Image: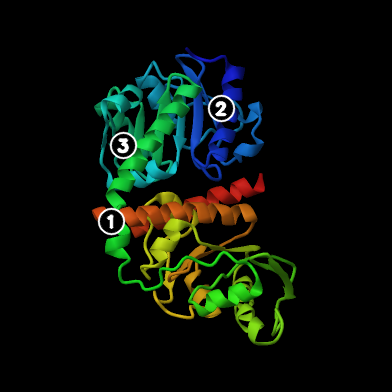
Amino acid sequence: MAYEVEEAKKLVIEAGHRLLNEGLIVRTWGNISARISDEQFVITPSGKNYEGLTPDDIVVVNIKNCAYEGDIKPSSECGIHADVYAMRPEVNFVIHTHQTYASVVSIMGLDVDLTDEEKAFLGDRIPCADYGMSSSDKLRRKVKKALKNSKDCRSMLLMNHGVLCMGTDTENAFEISSVMEQVCKYKYESMTNSFTKTELIKTSSTDEPDQEETEEALEEDIKNGYVDYGISHIDGDEITLILGDNEYKFKMGDKKPIGRGFLKRSLNRIAAVHAKIYENRDISNIWHVTLPNIIDISKTGEGFKPYIDDQAQIVGVSVRCVGRPGKKPHFESASAIVRGLKDNNAVLIADQGAICVGRTESDTEATAFVLEKGCMAAKLAMCVNAKPVSGRIASKEREFYKESYSKLDSN
């Protein structure tokens, strides 16, 4: 059941919004297509933000040779979609996502076995295609090989990268994505349930951060070893820092930006961290992120290399950690945090989570999202001894992202 071309374009745009809303992709990472005949399909364009897509942006592509109509380039991974439509005549809708649990499980490079109930949705198993760099001919070849070796699969892991879901229609593709995510979530949790006991036992700082938001409560947290670095943005030379429910405005270079006295001393140190980062980076937003898996990895006191390539792209080729677990009070110097952020958009602070930065609020949110997923992958890697993406590939992925994002930013 191929779609009429205008209906196909409409469904692809709606699917892009749905992927963003459900957190299955960030930025333009991932791609969506729909079959319109035995010879052609439509697909999302390269380097355009999904929120602003119109039917004119959706590209018609030939299945046989990936030739396309018009001046807008199709997704750089349209060859993978073409191979699916050529090899699977029953498939009419394809979504490629970076959904969390499935992407994390892909780092093992192993097929996923299924129960009889799961097979009804996903086929005999979920195969894992060997690694190929984003948008490369190698990745296309690896996916095509996996398709040949698993003739009834309806979903696929792409090692260190993401997933491919192949549906008879748009709803079936999303249903496959949902079931696949649940299967991989169960697998992930079963393989990492001992992480806290085995990997974090050396850490003495295990208390939950206090939820009170007054200045006095922030000060008490600091005495107990937890520092809330807050969030901030900069406009010109004026920084707006938010700590709990308290908002402070100060100028770059202010010596005592939060005020004087014992209660303000710690808050001035936090303000100094933000000012120092802005002084050294061309960014507008700083967030202290305390998502659960980021906290877990920060408690190890160790940095790590990326196991998923979108971490290399968006966060950086490695994640550093400053400080040591169990240190109280747990202030880290502004200079140490700035060094940790060199060439990266995030740095771990031992026991405290991470500082994420970005040129916009959207940039910073994407960094936090991808770092949390990267920390999940790091936890799994500690349990199964998986290897990170090579340094050479990580550097290439980072450069690819910068180039692609600069094009997106100019649209």
User: Could you classify mark 2 by the number of other residues whose Cα lies within 10 Å: few (under 14), some (14-19), or many (20 or more)?
Assistant: many
Q: Tag 3, which secondary structure?
A: helix
Residue bearing the label numbered 1: 194
In screen coordinates, is 1 left or right of 45? left
Cα distance in 3D space between marks 3 and 2: 25 Å
Cα distance in 3D space between marks 1 and 2: 41 Å
**Front: mark 3 or 2:** 2
Determine the residue located farthest toward the top in the rendered image: 1
User: Could you classify mark 1 by the number of other residues whose Cα lies within 10 Å: few (under 14), some (14-19), or many (20 or more)?
Assistant: few
**Front: mark 1 or 2:** 1
What's the residue at 68%, 87% (across, down)?
A: 261
Residue bearing the label numbered 3: 142
User: Which of the 4 image quarters holds residue 158?
Assistant: top left
The circle drawn on residue 121 is none
Residue type at mark 3 is Lys
The circle drawn on residue 12 is 2
Q: Earlier in the sequence, mark 1 or mark 2?
A: 2
Residue type at mark 1 is Ser
| Residue 223 seen anywhere in this rendered image of the structure | yes
The quadrant of the image that shows the C terminus is top right
Cα distance in 3D space between marks 3 and 1: 33 Å
Q: Tag 1, which secondary structure?
A: loop
Q: In the picture shown, does residue 145 fall above or below 161? A: above
**Front: mark 3 or 1:** 1
